[in-house]
Image: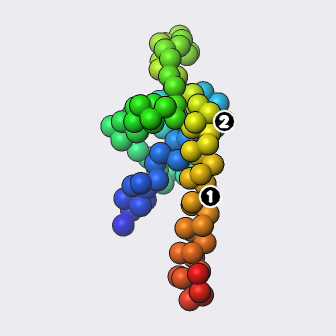
């Protein structure tokens, strides 16, 4: 199973984490995701933009059109609700990953 298949179900908190550093437009978010993962998460726009739109519908992000580098781009920003959701997902991930790691190493969870 490749990294993109493993990513299923985890993309939303990764996008929230990228936007925690500050507002950004879609292409920059895609590049940041690729860069932070050392190229493992090289996702197409058709995967990332629907996730951004879903997060915005859930009020975890807001967006507005802004001029960036001489071009009009939709810039996404984390909301307070998004900050709380990211904190919760981080707690869930730490608990889950510690349990899986223990089990893979033959230790009790």
Residue 6 rendering spot, x and y as whole percentages? 41, 61
Query: Which quadrant does the C terminus fall into?
Result: bottom right
What residue is at 52 percent from the left and 47 percent from the top?
13
Graded by Cα atoms within 10 Å as few (under 14), some (14 to 19) or many (20 or more), the crowding at tag 1 reads few
Report if residue 38 is visible in the image.
no
Residue 56 rendering spot, x and y as whole percentages? 45, 31
Observer-nearest of 20 and 28: 20
- Name the residue tied to disc 2: 21
Observer-nearest of 66 and 59: 59
Q: Which mark is on residue 59?
A: none
| Residues at marks 2 and 1, CA–CA distance in whole angstroms | 19 Å
Q: Is residue 99 above or below residue 68?
A: below
The mark lying in front, picked from 2 and 1, is: 1
Report if residue 15 is visible in the image.
yes
- Name the residue tied to disc 1: 91
Residue 20 rendering spot, x and y as whole percentages? 64, 37
What residue is at 41 percent from the left and 44 percent from the top?
43
Rendered image quadrant of residue 35: top right
What residue is at 46 percent from the left and 48 percent from the top?
11
The residue furthest bottom is 106
What residue is at 59 percent from the left and 86 percent from the top?
108
Helix, strand or loop under label 2: loop
Observer-nearest of 109 and 1: 109
How many numbered tags mark residues here? 2
Q: Is residue 93 above or below residue 27?
A: below
């Amino acid at each position: 199973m490749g990294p993109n298949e493993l990513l299923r179900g985890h993309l939303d908190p990764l996008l929230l984490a990228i936007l925690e550093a500050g507002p950004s437009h879609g292409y920059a978010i895609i590049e940041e995701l690729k860069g932070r993962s050392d190229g493992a998460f090289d996702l197409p726009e058709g995967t990332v933009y629907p996730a951004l739109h879903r997060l915005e519908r859930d009020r975890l992000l807001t967006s507005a059109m802004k001029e960036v580098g001489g071009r009009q781009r939709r810039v996404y920003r984390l909301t307070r609700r998004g900050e709380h959701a990211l904190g919760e997902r981080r707690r869930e991930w730490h608990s889950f990953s510690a349990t899986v790691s223990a089990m893979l190493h033959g230790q009790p969870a």
